[in-house]
Amino acid sequence: MHELTIAVVTALSPSSTTLSEYGLHLLASLGKKAGVRVVALVEDRDDISYPDIPGVEIVPTWRFDGWSTPIRVTRTARRIGADVVLFNAHFTSFGSRKVPAALGLLGPALARLAGVKTVTLLHNIVETVDLEAAGFGSNAIVERLLRAIGTALTWILLRSHLVTTTMPAYVDILRTTYGASNVALTPHGSFEVPSPPQPPPARPRIMTFGKFGTYKRVEVLIEAVRLLDRADVEVVVAGTDSPNTPGYLADVESRLGGPTIHFTGYVAEEDVEDIFRSSTLTVFPYTATTGSSGVLHQAGSYGCPPVLPRIGDLEGLVHEEGYTGVFFEPDDAADLARAIAGVLDDEDRRNAIADHNHRAAAGLPLDDVVDWYLIHFGTLVLGSPVSVLRASLPRPAEGGNVL
């Protein structure tokens, strides 16, 4: 059987770049598959040490905010003999500045021109992004310009042999607005499905997790908890600044911090489960969304009930993927306080949400979603999905390599 060489262009934890956690779990799932060679084309950085991922070779290739990303990715893909390149992409995956961020998204088209099969996993689309909330639109003229550029970049991304998204609504938009016929749905998937939910800690602990400062802001959460006026409630802000807002969390801590408000900084992958399991609930203090939520899937996996804003994409995702939660009006501290109290004070409701979401997470792990990609890869490269899927049994554990 032909061994497929799959190159995956992605940020990778412990980098704080967008989609680095998803990249880690995507690679871990691909690395379990036999009959394929998986090569991760990751950021070229001297300040972090990448983990060994069984079955995956790690090749530092591109630089965040670099201008030569498409060229470097294409050259490396050709050098390693990639049969197909999967781009794990977001509109800010390759830069916090507008020009390098846009240039990075030319990678799939350039790789295709170089004769390599390309698949783009597009986590967001410009039609559904609140550019101002995401840190890109500063006024109406700038926003119109950026949307025009985003539309042009979408046309270019659709030059990939295949574009996949994690949201059914995105598939519909790409097909109807752009007339694309090379678009498919591949669900987000749960990173892992551990043991069932455990009893929450005796002291109520409200946690929020992510990269903060643009459309994810923690002031409303802190205000909501103070409105509860309950001395026994702790707040844990787990994560880092968004690349677009350096220094945001340090500023919030200096202004609003206190003995019951804890800022953890970066959470290592091996500590993620403990952060969720030691929390009573997870709050999503978002004012907008830019696609599917990995944090929602993690909360489901670890049985930590979510408190979510009523935002179109996020609320749609919750229902489409079988999750549930308690909702509040975004950026409304009083309504968030109401939602939090409703979960804290109702143990039966809290347990029901945790059990429901754990079952939803168990129903579609990322390991299974990866098989969908193998079907597409086999069709693109070999003309037959079966030739790749029949090699999908887990491979023996082995250390990753850094080239």
Image: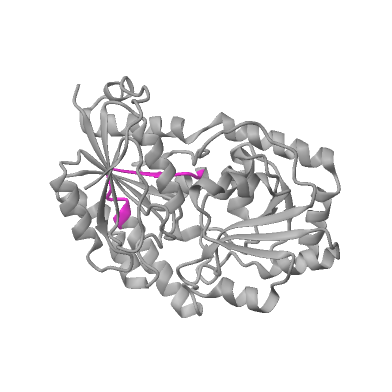
List x then y, in percent, for residue 203.
79, 52
The picture quadrant where one finds residue 8 is top left
Q: Residue at 37% of width from left, 41% of height from top?
A: 27
Residue found 59% across the figure and 77% down from its top? 251
Task: Please say if 386 is above or below 283.
Answer: above
Residue occupying the point 41% across, 46% down: 24
Figure check: 263 above or below 116 = below
- 177 sits left or right of 341 in the view: left
Tell me if 136 is positioned left or right of 64 in this view. right
Q: Is 16 displayed left or right of 303 in the figure?
A: left
Coordinates of residue 205 in the picture (x, y in percent) = 74, 54
Camera sees residue 384 = yes
Residue 310 appears in view: no
Name the spot of residue 174 as percent of width and height, x first: 42, 49
**What colouring does the structure picture have?**
one colour
**How many marks are shown on the rendered structure?**
0
Seen at 38% across and 62% down, the residue is 151
The range drawn in magenta is: 156-167
- Nearer to the camera, 401 or 72: 401
Residue 256 appears in which quarter of the rendering? bottom right
Which of the 4 image quarters holds residue 28?
top left
Q: Nearer the viewer, residue 338 or 137?
A: 338
Classify the position of the N terminus by image quarter: top left
Q: Is residue 370 above or below residue 180?
A: above
